[in-house]
Image (tube, grey):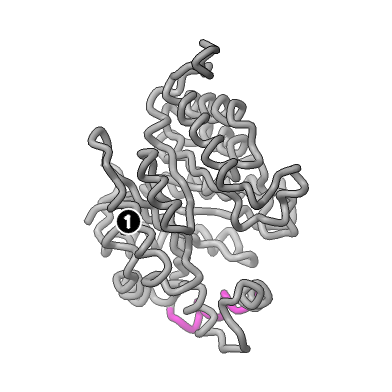
Amino acid sequence: MSFKLGFLSHAFGDDPQQVYRDLIEQFEVAEALGFDGGWIAQHHLSNGFGRLPSPLVLLAAVAERTRHIELGTGVIVLPFEDPIRLAEDASVLDALSGGRVQLGLGSGGANLDNFSAFGRDALQRQVDFSDSQQQVQQLLDGEPLTPHNPLTLQPPATGLSSRLWHSHGSLEGAAYTASQGNGLLLGTATHDPLTVQKPLADAYLNAWTRTDRQPRIGVVRAIFPAPDRASAQAELAVDIERHIPRLQREGLIDQAVDLQEHLRLMNVHHGHPDEVIESLQRDPSLLPYADYLIAVVQAESSTQAQILKRLEIIARDIAPALGWRGRE
């Protein structure tokens, strides 16, 4: 099957100025390689995992340096946002970029520590998400603010409401995404994707009833090509060690295991391009479902040269072998 190809960055690094310059370069290089889109994760008050709380601001800079590549958020934590201001900012970015925004939204399930800082109740995050998402979507559709208030979004965001995505980790959330007519984003799956993500994709597709548009599933996967598997593991070893405490807290591992088992638990596709292709072809939640394959190619210790090389190998060798045709 044919799919779009994108990449996702978490904005790692200690020097924000360099991090943002590198991100812009990644978009420029990805566009030259034919990638359909680039996506940026949002991180608030981070302990170093990510350095970008304002992805739409960064993507405005990217829009001025690129012409074709789509500009995605993967994802904005919606309960922390004012929905009117978010709709306005996204609409401005869409106008600046010529209609290239892909607006990914989430409820903040991976950022529970931040809710108190924003004065939000983590237990109410799903309700807050749906309330805000519906208002954002209503405004992007050009509808009045309320039945009693005729104000509408300025500038108008023609077509942007058809480029909304939700990130959900429950069957109910996947079905809700379908009910709203939006795309479903599936994360890197630091579990078995067969038992965790395939049911989400099936629930989403089974709940889809819209006739004016097609369902869309974006699948995020960690993809680390290298000359061979040993080289890839050597590059990733330091970063995997950093993740062990998190994996233990989340119950993904309950004992010390070797590096290869950590990579399996984190669903990292790595090694020679032929090995990566074979690994991705075996992924039960990828090729049968993906309308958008979004590659994570950056670990916390990755250099810019490594990131750009991985993007090149994915576009040249890996994605075409999986059915990607590139931009026409």
Which residue carries the number 1 mark? Answer: 290
Q: Position of residue 268 (x, y in %)?
A: 47, 72
Residue found 46% across the figure and 26% down from its top: 138
Label 1: how many Cα within 10 Å (few below 14, some 14–19, many 20+): many
Q: Position of residue 200 (x, y in %)?
A: 38, 59
Residues 270 and 202: in front is 202
Q: Is residue 231 magenta?
A: yes
Residue 181 sits above or below residue 249 on the image: above
- The residues colored magenta run 228-238
Judged left or right of residue 96, residue 55 is: right
Residue 21 sits above or below residue 187 on the image: above
Judged left or right of residue 159, residue 59 is: right
Residue 111 seen in this snapshot: yes
Residue 309 seen in this snapshot: no
Q: Where's the C terminus, which quadrant?
A: top left
Q: Where's the N terminus, which quadrant?
A: bottom left
Give the quarter of the image for residue 48: bottom right
Q: Which amino acid is tagged 1?
A: Ala
Secondary structure found at label 1: loop
Residue found 54% across the figure and 28% down from its top: 87
Q: Position of residue 50 (x, y in %)?
A: 66, 55
Residues 187 and 66: in front is 187
How many discs mark residues in the rendered view? 1
Residue 155 sits above or below residue 59 on the image: above
Q: Is residue 205 magenta?
A: no
Judged left or right of residue 226, residue 76 is: right
Q: Main secondary structure of the magenta part?
A: helix
